Image: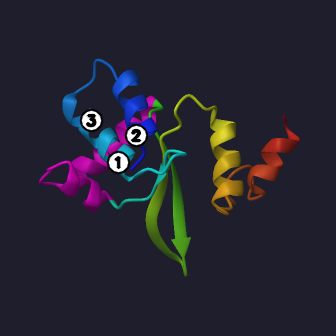
């Protein structure tokens, strides 16, 4: 759990449904100090006392669409694992991508034609 991430959520999430804020706080509770976590949708639903995993999945997608989180798909042996989720805490999307690739050894081949973050860096 990161107090810094939870504090950021409490200060920055405004005027939205309380259930969505609760899901964001659950993600923050799982997050490390960089705002990175990877709980499954079922785990998020259970911790937010939601009875339907689809409801949790929808709220997570809405949080992503609003920019409160960024998600990255993870696969191993052609099977999807829990998504890596980041609460960016005012960092730019590029900074989050750089952190995910460097600090978490998480290659993002689906970005910029399969060349990962290196291709994006060449464009900046």
For label 3, count other residues whose C-alpha is less than 10 Å away and answer few (under 14), some (14-19) or many (20+): some
Q: Residue at x 54, y 76 (%)?
A: 76
Which type of secondary structure does the marked residue at label 3 adopt?
Answer: helix
In this view, 115 is above or below 91: below
Q: Give the position of the C terminus as an image quadrant.
A: top right
Residue span colored magenta:
41-66
**Residue on which the image places disc 3:** 20
Left-right relation of 20 to 68:
left
Q: Position of residue 70 (x, y in %)?
A: 51, 43
For label 1, count other residues whose C-alpha is less than 10 Å away and answer few (under 14), some (14-19) or many (20+): some
Report the predominant secondary structure element of the magenta stretch.
helix
Mark 3 vs mark 1: which is more N-terminal?
Answer: 3
**Residue on which the image places disc 2:** 3
Q: Quadrant of residue 123?
A: top right
Q: Residue at x 14, y 50 (%)?
A: 49
Q: Position of residue 105 (x, y in %)?
A: 67, 63
Q: Quadrant of residue 40?
A: bottom left
**Residue on which the image places disc 1:** 29
On the question of residue 110 being in view, the answer is no
Q: In the rendering, which numbered label is found on residue 41? A: none
Q: Is residue 57 magenta?
A: yes
How many angstroms separate mark 2 from mark 3 (CA)?
19 Å
Left-right relation of 93 to 115:
left
Q: Position of residue 113 (x, y in %)?
A: 75, 54
């Amino acid at each position: 759990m990161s107090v810094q991430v939870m504090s950021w959520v409490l200060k920055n999430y405004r005027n939205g449904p309380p259930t969505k804020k609760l899901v964001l706080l659950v993600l923050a509770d799982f997050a490390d100090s960089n705002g990175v976590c990877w709980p499954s949708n079922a785990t998020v639903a259970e911790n937010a006392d939601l009875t339907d995993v689809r409801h949790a999945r929808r709220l997570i997608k809405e949080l992503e669409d609003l920019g409160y989180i960024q998600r990255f798909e993870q696969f191993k042996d052609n099977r999807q694992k829990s998504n890596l989720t980041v609460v960016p805490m005012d960092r730019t999307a590029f900074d989050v991508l750089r952190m995910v690739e460097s600090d978490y050894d998480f290659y993002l081949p689906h970005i910029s034609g399969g060349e990962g973050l290196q291709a994006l860096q060449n464009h900046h």
